[in-house]
Amino acid sequence: MASRNNNQINIPEAKEAMNRFKMECANEVGVNLKQGYNGDLSSREAGSVGGQMVKKMIESYENSMK
């Protein structure tokens, strides 16, 4: 049985917000993202952007618990 990827954002405003968040995180770690396809990024660069996004989401959640 094949696995289905359900990681799609269905709300346009949420998709735009996630793209802004991704660009912000990429700037923080020094990765040059462009709008649209970024398949030329190395795994290390893509991972550092994703890692920064997760780090900021965890920090935000922890701050909201205070």
Image: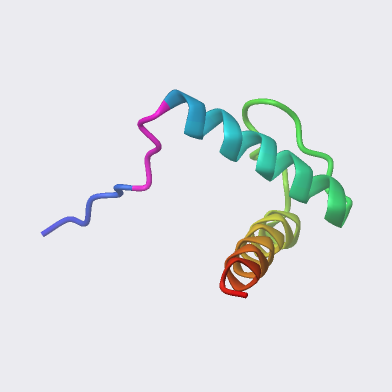
What residue range appears in magenta?
7-11
At horizontal 61% and vertical 73% (from top left) the residue drawn is: 62
**What residue appears at the point 21 percent right and 56 percent down from the top-left corner?**
3
Side of 4 where 28 appears, left or right:
right
Is residue 7 rendered to the left or right of residue 61?
left
Q: Nearer the viewer, residue 25 or 63?
A: 63
Residue 29, how many percent across, how many down? 85, 56
Q: Nearer the viewer, residue 55 or 60?
A: 60
Q: Is residue 39 above or below residue 46?
A: above
Prevailing secondary structure of the magenta residues: loop
Residue 49 location (% of width, % of height): 71, 55
For the point 89% across and 51% down, the residue is 30
- Which quarter of the rendered picture does the C terminus lie within? bottom right
- Residue 46 image-quadrant placement: bottom right
Residue in the image at 50% along x and 26% along y = 13
Magenta stretch encompasses residue 32? no
